[in-house]
Structures are given as structure tokens and as C-alpha cells.
């Protein structure tokens, strides 16, 4: 039997498998004819070869010829007549095989009696690609018409569509194999080939990693199959975002601009450009081509400019290429360099009391964290030593105020403190002032101008000093003023009476009222003869809300003893006032109800009784209603008018009616402060002849303030209205004088003092004074059984001293944060028979009974009369801070005192401060979960974490109180420039309306940890701040974005531009005498009242 040659698939590019070799009409006769034709054709084309070749590829040409590419490089064409396609395989005659010297042929026995076949070259791909003749002859042809290659763009799954046909019309199905087949799927019916996952040119998944995917597509039909090798090439698309290779952080040293270099590449080869965005982007520049990021201004570690203020600058670097962009968050941290000189935080001045060595503490810090050491130089350095580590400066020998040893001889010692850190130094000039010490006894006969001021009367029997009081700040210059009554003066007619207002100043001097100038003060002259104007005097607070403190002057003998009281408005330019021609611009008059009422026998500010923001007034009429007595409360308001007390309306005020005939309610009246802590100021009214504790034992009544004042009958006083303080024993005359005591024990409630000047505990008529503590729930008090929880007793020195004939709060004389007390004893004999005495008793957390005969320097001090029978301390009062040194001062009236042998009367101002009991050491306290009670000294103290139920008294000095919640009990900055810091978020502090638990602050900082707000109006600002100068009271608010100041009366304020304060910009708003400075980052808004 003849043999057939089959050329393998490596030569043909495709393989064929005949699963069923049919015997058909295609006889071997046809095959023999083809073989003869092939032999003839190939004989003329083939070249003899020593070595056999293989077929590397085939291609059926358009004319039906067959092109063969051989492994030896030859390309030959076989005539169409010299080959045949049988069951999908190319059949060559043996002569062609021989002529071409082909290797790798196999001999295949013919099946089914076909006989000897020529060589067979497997594969149909090239034939199908030639278009035509691609199928097998007869009913056995199965061939591909789809090509062996395809090209697709990345990022899509469509890849190739296989197309094969069966000449017999059998249904063709498809399947896949090959080395990259796992990456594809094929639709067995349609031949559609798809990627399982869209290919990525930049990350090829084919076996060779060259984006040429090799698969074998098999077609099957009628039990026959044929394969086609297919190469699918993936092409590149410009589809890639830039990719950063630079980091997300950078660390750079301060003082240089180089910050970071962004590096990004584009896999598509496009050029990358750079830009910046993000929180701190405005502080940087970026080179768009190189990605180099630089600070616009070199950063300073000690003054970070980033939004977080922590030297961590946050930017977004944006890389763009080929129309696509990507951003990367980058954090650039600025590190510290040792490049800073130390910085002083301690003051350039210090004030110390003589006879002690402690002088000053220098405090400097180095922003680079180096340890700071200190040294001294300067004019007076030899008189001092300094601790090089702590900065504590001490006198080598304790200074003597009376024998100053400084170079200038003026008790101002000048030194230079040098702070050194990290090899760098800085100097600070410091002036240390030595002040005089108030001795245990102040002798008015030798009073110096460093100790106080003497006011001399003008004429015989004028009785200057019969009444005295602080006047508040009448002219708005920032210094407290004072007022002195001279009820027997004759300037307005015989015994018409006068009152004199004296301005405070930093350099006080003795004053003779006969030569009083308008620079020193002014006179208020009585209306008519025998009025005795000035019998009683008091500050009125700010009655009309114009920012100037006002005055009230009693004339109890006016109008045939009906009595009158005059309100005098404060103003920047005070002039003498004649009450007989008082205008509505100057003030207004209260006219007594009936003859012999003696309205005006006592007068006082009432505080803000009804919580409307205006200070109110109280006028006593002790003889009203047949000696029952009465007191009249008159409400303040923007426009005061003359008022007849007999027709007082509920809009104008209310009446407090005495208990029983002869009680003399209204003998003494005063504001009581806020005794029960409800936010309304309360009142105290004395009835010195009350008999509840025995005949003429005396009584005092505390009346609570409230929003809707109504008449009060003391005979039926309820606990909701107030309480009674009942005298100790018959004849004590408790209530001869009454006053607010301030907060003596620092518990956040205002306290009271009641004088009983003929009490006998210290000897017959030695006199007594009783301190009654305020509390949330007041109840009636019997002075006979006074407990330590209720208060304490101040017992007179000896018989006939009449201690308690005059009593008052002294303010905070020694700057320790506790309000002090002032008790007059006009019969005291230490300075001569009936020379009189006054006693200052210091407040403290744990008050105990005080015996004035054994008063210690730790308990207080004595002010001793200057001459026999002068009877100093017939009247006493706090004077406020007259000289502006941060300590409250005192004023003592001596109406029987002698000037050049003439009994004209005098008044004495005693400066507070130098008492050797206060401390200027800085207090630093931190609140706890308990109800804390903190008190500062005379230094710049700080109190932090203040919250629930806490009480803080700053005392003198520039204090800082930091609150974390708004449910504190009481915070009071005291004298000085004091700051209230809100440390939290969502804190909304409303200072309008009836509020007495926030006092004496000049600055509030809202910054905190989140958004906070402050609600104010003009009246609350004027009441809160002591920062007054030139008639303008200033209040400052700091904060940041998100914080707000809410002005209920915003429409009444005028925007007055901006002001720079210590390098910060503030928006300025004005409203009359009120000036508000608001950090320009803080919003100022209004809400409906």
C-alpha cells in the first residue's frame, strides 16, 4: 500500500485532528491527479537542498495558489492544482515534498480503501485568511475565516471574534485552550472571545508579559474539530493617573523656606505638573514643573503660622498629567532651632512694703527650652541679691521707707535683670518701689500724704465730716471719688448745708474746702436755710445709666422737716451745684411725704433691686407715721424726674413701712448687696428703737430685691420678702447704723453689718457691731443667740466708746480677696478724751468674734483721733480706690475736729494696701470636683478649672480666672485689670439683667476649645468693668472664629473702626460712656430683647 506524508502543526501554524475519516466520493484517483500536477509545478520551483526544511507558515493566495514559508528562509508558491484540502488539512503530493526536501513528514495509511495519499500539511488558518477555498471539499470541510491576530485597546473586555464554517452546514461550537486561555472566556455558540478582566497595558497579564496574549480557538462541527492559534495584542491608552513616589510627610527646621519636593510619574509618559491646595496652602509656593514646595516666608517655630498653631502645616499637592489629576495630603512639620533669646513675662515694676526683704521675682522663658539663669546689674543692684535659678530678687537688708537707700532717695530702686539661656541674653529694667507700712495704729495727728489725705473744714461749726461716703467714679477718670457732708454750712443760708465731692487721683494732697478748685472737686450747696443738706450722703451708683456714677444727698430738715433728698448726676466736668436751682440735666429731687417725716435722714444706693440694669436708691424717713418710720425705694432710669414720696407710684418705686410706732424704721438704710445670691440686690433698713428684743433693743430688716417691687409692711414681713435681725438687749439701739459688709468670709454671698453703739458687752456703752453672713435661705436672727454659722460679734474696747455708732464695709483694704469692715467708735480715748477711733477688721474665711480691746495686727488696725473731743468716726465709709493703687481706701468723718483752733470739722482719707497682712506672692489655684473657695492676694493671681459651685475672689492685682462651666457660685476679679477666661465649648455667658455673681472684670476671653458667646448690653458693661478713663468705661472681648458677642441693644451702638492692642486687631463699638473692644475674629450680633 502506498503511504501519505503529513507535515506537522509546527510547520503549518495549525493542527488538525480527524476523528472520523470518512470514505466519500473523493477518490484516490483525484488525489493522484493532484499529486501529478504538484510534482510538475514544484519541479520548476524547488531547489535541491542538502538538509531538509520544514514549513513555518502557509498562506492561500487570492488566485488559489498556496504560499509556503520554509525554515531555511525560502518562500515558494504551490500551484492550486498541486494541493488539496482534505478534512481541514493541506494535502501535498509526494513530489512536492520531495522537491522541497521537507522534513517531519509522517506516513499515514489510507483508510477506507482510499489508497495511497500524498503528503498532508495540517492547518487551515492561512487558507481561511485568504478568503475563498477555506472550507473542505465535499461534506467534510471545517475551516476558520477569522484571522490569527487581533488588536484591542486596554481597559475593555471585548477581544476577538472567532468565525469558522462547516461546508456540510453542521453547527459549529467553540472552545479555548492555550497558555493564556485562563484569562479569557468564549461564547461557545458565537465564538466571541472576551477578557475575564479588562487588561491593563501597564500591568500585562499574559504569560510573556508583553501584552501579546496567545490562545488556541477550537472549532467543532459534526464530530470534527479544528484549532486556530490566535495572538491578541493589547495596545496602550492614555488612561493612567500620575503616581506619587514622594512621601506624605516632611520635617524641616525653622528659619528656612525649603519645605518639600513632590515627585509623581505618569505611566503613559505624559509630563506631570504640580499645584497646591489645602488648609495651609496660602503659606507656600510650588514650582509647577519640579514639584519643589517652599514657604513664602521662613517659618518660626515659636510663632507657628499653621492653622492649628502646632507647627504642623497641612497641604494638598495636586499632580496633573494627560488631563487627569491626583492629590496627596502632605504634612510638613517645622522643628525647633536654638535661635531665641529668653523672653521676660514678669513685670517691669514691683511694689513692696518696707521692713521685708522679698522684692521681686524675675520670670523668663526660652522658647527653645533651654534653662534660664538670672543675674543683676544697674544703679541699685548692690542693694539686692538674686537667685540665679529662680529669679527671686531680695534686698540684702530690709528697706526702711523713712530712710530710703536707693540712688534717687525716693524709695524707687532701679535694677537690671539679665536672663541667659542657650548662650543668649536679654535685659529688663525693673523699678522696685518701697511703700510705707500702716502700723497697728494710724495716728491722724501725724498723718502723712503717703498715708492719706486730710480735708479741712471752712468755717466754725460747719460740721464737715458729719457724713462721708465713696462717690464711685463721678467724673469717669478711672479713680474713685468721695463725698463729705457739711450739714451746718451757711453758703446757701443759715445751716442750709453743703456736700463736697472730691476727685481721686494718683497723687493725693490735703485739701482746704475754702479754696476748693474744680480740678479738686465741686460743692453741692443747700437749697434753703435750715435744710441741713449733707446730713447724709452716699454714692447713688449709676442711676441713669450714662456711665458716670451719681450721688445722693439728704436734707432731712427741708420743707419744715418733711425732708428731701437730691440726686446729682455724675459728669466728666463737674461744677458747683446750687440745689435751689437744680436743673433736670443736673439731677432731681425726692420730696418728703409729711412734715416731721425727716425724709433724707439716711440715704444710700440700693444697688439694682429690680434687676433692670439701672442702680436704684433708698431714702430713710425715720419719723414717718408717728415715728413708725419708713423707707422709700426709688427705681433708676434713663430720665429721672422730681418725685413726691407721698404719691410714689409702683412704676417709680415702693415703700417699706415700719412695724410699730416709735420704732424709727429708716434711721439707717443701705444696700445689702446680694445677700441670698438670687441675682437681685437686697436692702437693709434699721429701726433702732424697735422693741422685739427688749425696749429699744433695736432691729434691722433685710428686704430681698425682685423684678416686681411691691410695698412692704415690716409688721407682716414674710420669709419670701426677707428676714429680721433682732437686737440683743434692751437699750442697745441695734441698727443705729447698718451697711452692706461686702463678702467678708468669701463664700459668694454678701454679708451685713449692724451697729449697736450703746451695747454693753465690752463695758457700759462700749458698743458693738454684728456681722451677719448672707446665705441662700435667710431666716430671722436673734443677736442674743448669734451662732458662728450666722456671723460674729465685734465688741467695743471700753465703756462709752460707742463702737458701732457708724459701720461700713471697708472694701478690700489689704487686697487679700476678703472684704473688710470699718467700725466707728466716736467716744474712744486713745488719742485724747473723746478723740474717737475707727477700727478696720479684716475679713477671713473663718470669722470669729473680735474684741477691739485686744485687736491684733493680724485682725486689723486702729485709726486714732488726732485731738481730744474731735470725735472722729461719727461717720465712716469705704472710699473706693481713691489713688488707683488697687487697694480700697477709707474715709473717716470728724465733724468736731479743730483746724487752727476752730471747730470746723474734718475728714480723713486713709490709703489701703500697706498693712503688712496682705501678700503680693502670686496665688495659683486649680479647681476640683468639690465646691472650691479661692481667694487671691495683692499679686497677679490665677485660678483655673473653676466650675460648679466655686467661689473665687481675685483681690488686688491683675488676676486671671478660668471657668470651665457657668454654674459657679461667684467670681470677682477685684481691683486691677482682671480677665475671665471661658475654657470650654458651647458656653453662653449672659451678663444682662439681674446678675451679681460676675463682678469686676475688664476682659473676657471666649476662645476656649470651641464656639462660645457673651451677651452684653451697655448697662451690664458699665457695671462690670473698672477700666474707666476720661469718662469712658472700656471692656475687651477676645476670641476666635465661631465665637460671638451678642448685644441686646446693638442698634444703640456705633461702630468706631478698629484698634490695635498688643498686636491684635479689635473692632471698636461705642454707646455713650461705654466702649466695647471685640477681637476682629469674633462675630458681633443682636437678638431681640
Image (tube, rainbow, N blue to C red):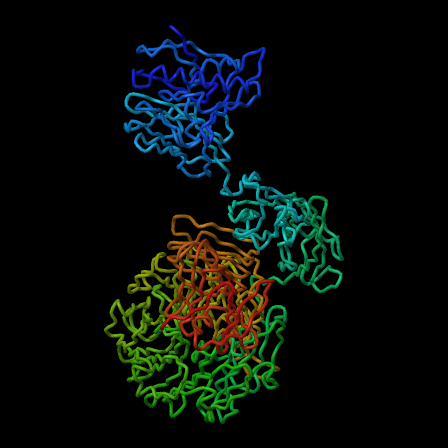
Say which quarter of the image contains residue 118. Answer: top left
Q: Position of residue 850 (x, y in %)?
A: 44, 59
Q: Position of residue 754 (x, y in %)?
A: 39, 68
Q: Is residue 411 left or right of residue 55?
A: right
Query: Which residue is at 39% across, 60% downward?
Result: 792
Say which quarter of the image contains residue 253. Answer: top right
Q: Position of residue 16 (x, y in %)?
A: 38, 19
Q: Is residue 512 visible?
A: yes
Residue sitting at the far top: 1
In the foreground, 4 or 432: 4
With respect to residue 381, does 99 lie above or below?
above
Q: Is residue 435 left or right of residue 379?
A: left
Query: Which residue is at 54% across, 65% downward?
Result: 887
- Quarter occupied by the N terminus: top left
Number of residue marks: 0
With respect to residue 233, does 449 lie above or below?
below
Q: Is residue 188 left or right of residue 313?
A: left
Query: Which residue is at 49% across, 78% downward?
Result: 1072
In the foreground, 186 or 981: 186
Query: Which residue is at 52% across, 14% downward?
Result: 99
In the foreground, 213 or 530: 213
Q: Is residue 757 visible?
A: no
Q: Position of residue 468 (x, y in %)?
A: 49, 77
- Quarter occupied by the C terminus: bottom left
With respect to residue 515, does 979 lie above or below?
above
Amino acid at each position: 500500500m502506498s503511504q501519505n506524508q503529513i507535515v506537522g502543526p509546527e510547520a503549518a501554524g495549525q493542527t488538525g485532528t480527524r476523528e472520523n475519516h470518512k470514505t466519500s466520493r473523493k477518490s484516490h484517483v483525484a488525489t493522484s491527479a493532484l499529486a501529478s500536477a504538484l510534482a510538475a509545478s514544484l519541479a520548476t520551483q524547488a531547489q535541491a537542498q542538502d538538509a531538509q526544511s520544514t514549513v513555518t507558515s502557509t498562506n492561500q493566495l487570492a488566485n488559489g495558489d498556496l504560499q509556503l514559508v520554509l525554515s531555511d528562509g525560502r518562500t515558494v508558491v504551490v500551484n492550486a492544482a498541486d494541493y488539496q484540502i482534505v478534512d481541514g488539512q493541506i494535502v501535498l503530493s509526494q513530489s512536492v515534498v520531495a522537491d522541497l526536501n521537507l522534513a517531519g513528514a509522517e506516513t499515514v495509511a489510507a483508510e477506507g480503501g482510499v489508497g495511497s495519499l500524498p503528503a498532508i500539511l495540517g492547518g487551515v488558518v492561512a487558507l481561511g485568511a485568504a478568503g475563498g477555498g477555506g472550507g473542505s471539499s465535499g461534506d467534510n470541510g471545517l475551516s476558520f475565516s477569522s484571522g490569527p491576530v487581533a488588536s484591542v485597546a486596554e481597559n475593555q473586555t471585548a477581544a476577538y471574534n472567532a468565525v469558522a464554517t462547516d461546508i456540510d452546514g453542521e453547527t459549529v461550537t467553540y472552545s479555548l485552550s492555550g497558555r493564556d486561555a485562563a484569562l479569557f472566556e468564549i461564547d461557545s455558540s458565537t465564538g466571541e472571545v472576551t477578557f475575564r478582566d479588562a487588561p491593563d497595558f501597564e500591568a500585562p497579564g499574559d504569560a510573556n508579559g508583553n501584552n501579546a496574549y496567545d490562545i488556541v480557538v477550537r472549532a467543532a462541527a459534526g464530530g470534527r474539530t479544528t484549532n486556530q492559534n490566535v495572538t491578541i495584542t493589547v495596545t496602550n491608552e492614555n488612561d493612567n493617573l500620575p503616581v506619587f513616589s514622594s512621601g506624605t510627610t516632611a520635617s524641616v527646621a525653622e528659619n528656612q523656606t525649603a519645605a518639600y519636593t513632590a515627585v509623581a510619574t505618569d505611566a503613559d509618559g505624559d509630563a506631570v505638573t504640580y499645584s497646591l491646595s489645602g488648609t495651609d496652602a496660602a503659606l507656600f509656593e510650588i514650582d509647577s514643573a519640579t514639584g519643589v514646595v517652599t514657604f513664602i516666608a521662613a517659618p518660626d517655630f515659636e510663632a507657628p503660622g499653621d492653622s492649628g498653631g502646632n507647627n504642623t502645616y497641612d497641604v494638598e499637592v495636586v499632580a496633573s498629567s494627560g488631563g487627569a489629576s491626583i492629590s496627596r495630603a502632605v504634612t510638613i512639620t517645622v522643628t525647633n532651632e536654638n535661635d531665641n533669646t529668653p523672653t521676660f513675662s514678669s513685670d517691669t515694676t514691683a511694689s513692696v512694703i518696707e521692713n521685708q526683704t522679698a522684692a521681686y521675682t524675675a520670670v523668663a522663658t526660652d522658647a527653645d527650652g533651654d534653662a534660664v539663669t538670672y543675674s543683676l546689674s544697674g544703679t541699685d543692684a548692690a542693694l539686692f541679691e538674686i537667685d540665679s535659678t529662680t529669679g527671686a530678687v531680695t534686698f540684702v537688708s530690709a528697706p526702711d521707707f523713712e530712710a530710703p537707700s536707693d540712688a534717687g532717695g525716693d524709695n524707687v530702686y532701679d535694677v537690671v535683670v539679665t536672663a541667659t539661656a542657650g548662650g543668649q541674653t536679654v535685659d529688663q529694667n525693673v523699678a522696685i518701689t518701697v511703700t510705707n507700712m500702716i502700723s497697728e495704729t494710724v495716728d491722724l495727728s501725724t498723718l502723712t500724704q503717703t498715708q492719706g489725705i486730710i480735708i479741712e473744714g471752712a468755717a466754725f461749726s460747719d460740721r464737715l465730716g458729719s457724713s462721708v461716703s465713696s462717690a464711685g467714679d463721678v467724673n469717669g477718670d478711672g479713680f474713685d471719688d468721695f463725698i463729705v457732708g457739711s450739714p451746718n454750712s451757711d453758703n446757701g443760708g443759715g445751716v442750709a448745708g453743703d456736700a463736697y465731692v472730691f476727685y481721686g487721683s494718683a497723687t493725693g494732697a490735703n485739701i482746704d474746702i475754702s479754696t476748693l478748685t474744680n480740678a479738686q472737686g465741686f460743692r453741692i450747696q443747700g437749697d434753703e436755710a435750715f435744710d441741713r443738706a449733707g446730713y447724709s450722703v452716699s454714692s447713688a451708683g449709676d442711676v441713669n445709666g450714662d456711665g458716670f456714677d451719681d450721688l445722693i444727698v439728704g436734707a432731712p430738715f427741708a420743707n419744715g422737716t418733711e425732708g428731701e433728698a437730691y440726686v446729682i448726676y455724675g459728669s466728666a466736668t463737674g461744677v458747683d451745684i446750687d440745689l435751689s436751682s437744680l436743673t433736670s440735666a443736673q439731677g432731681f429731687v425726692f420730696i418728703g411725704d409729711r412734715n416731721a417725716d425727716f425724709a433724707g435722714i439716711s440715704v444710700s444706693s440700693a444697688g439694682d433691686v429690680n434687676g433692670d440694669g439701672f442702680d436704684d436708691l433708698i431714702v430713710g424717713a425715720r419719723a414717718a407715721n408717728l415715728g413708725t418710720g419708713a423707707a422709700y425705694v426709688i427705681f433708676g432710669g434713663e430720665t429721672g424726674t422730681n418725685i413726691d414720696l407721698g404719691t410714689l407710684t409702683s412704676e417709680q418705686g415702693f415703700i417699706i413701712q415700719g412695724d410699730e410706732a416709735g420704732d424709727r424704721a429708716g434711721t439707717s438704710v443701705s444696700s445689702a448687696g446680694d445677700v441670698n445670691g438670687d441675682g437681685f440686690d437686697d436692702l437693709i433698713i434699721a429701726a433702732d428703737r424697735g422693741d422685739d428684743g427688749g425696749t429699744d433693743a433695736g432691729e434691722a430688716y433685710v428686704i430681698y430685691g425682685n423684678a416686681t417691687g411691691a410695698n412692704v409692711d415690716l409688721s407682716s414681713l414674710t420669709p419670701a420678702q426677707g428676714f429680721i435681725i433682732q437686737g440683743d438687749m434692751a437699750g442697745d439701739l441695734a441698727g443705729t447704723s447698718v451697711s452692706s459688709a461686702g463678702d467678708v468670709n468669701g463664700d459668694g454671698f454678701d454679708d451685713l453689718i449692724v451697729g449697736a453703739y450703746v451695747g454693753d458687752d465690752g463695758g457700759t456703752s462700749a458698743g458693738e457691731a454684728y456681722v451677719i453672713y448672707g446665705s441662700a435661705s435667710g431666716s430671722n436672727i436673734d443677736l442674743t443667740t448669734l451662732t458662728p454659722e450666722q456671723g460674729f460679734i465685734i465688741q467695743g474696747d471700753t465703756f462709752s466708746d460707742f463702737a458701732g455708732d457708724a459701720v461700713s464695709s471697708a472694701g478690700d483694704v489689704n487686697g487679700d480677696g476678703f472684704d473688710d469692715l470699718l467700725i466707728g467708735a466716736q467716744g474712744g480715748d486713745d488719742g485724747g478724751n473723746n478723740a474717737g477711733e475707727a477700727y478696720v477688721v479684716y475679713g477671713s474665711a473663718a470669722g470669729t468674734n473680735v474684741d477691739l480691746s485686744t485687736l491684733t495686727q493680724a485682725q486689723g488696725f486702729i485709726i486714732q483721733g488726732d485731738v481730744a473731743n474731735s470725735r472722729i468716726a461719727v461717720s465712716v465709709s469705704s472710699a473706693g480706690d481713691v489713688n488707683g493703687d488697687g487697694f480700697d481706701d477709707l474715709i473717716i468723718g470728724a465733724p468736731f475736729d479743730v483746724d487752727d483752733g476752730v471747730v470746723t470739722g474734718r475728714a480723713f482719707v486713709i490709703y489701703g494696701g500697706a498693712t503688712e497682712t496682705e501678700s503680693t506672692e502670686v496665688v495659683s489655684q486649680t479647681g476640683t470636683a468639690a465646691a472650691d473657695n479661692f481667694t487671691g492676694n495683692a499679686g497677679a493671681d490665677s485660678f483655673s478649672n473653676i466650675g460648679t459651685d466655686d467661689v473665687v475672689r481675685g483681690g488686688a492685682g491683675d488676676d486671671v480666672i478660668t471657668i470651665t462651666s457657668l454654674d459657679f457660685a461667684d467670681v470677682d476679679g477685684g481691683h486691677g485689670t482682671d480677665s475671665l477666661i471661658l475654657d470650654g465649648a458651647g458656653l453662653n455667658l449672659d451678663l444682662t439683667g439681674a446678675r451679681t455673681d460676675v463682678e469686676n472684670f475688664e476682659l473676657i476671653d471666649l476662645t476656649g476649645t470651641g464656639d462660645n458667646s457673651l451677651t452684653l448690653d451697655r448697662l451690664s458693661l458699665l457695671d462690670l468693668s473698672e477700666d474707666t478713663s476720661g469718662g469712658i468705661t472700656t471692656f475687651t472681648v477676645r476670641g476666635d472664629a465661631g465665637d460671638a458677642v451678642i448685644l441686646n441693644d446693638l442698634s444703640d451702638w456705633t461702630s468706631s473702626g478698629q484698634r490695635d492692642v498688643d498686636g491684635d486687631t479689635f473692632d471698636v463699638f461705642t454707646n455713650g460712656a461705654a466702649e466695647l473692644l471685640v477681637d476682629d475674629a469674633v462675630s458681633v450680633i443682636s437678638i431681640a430683647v
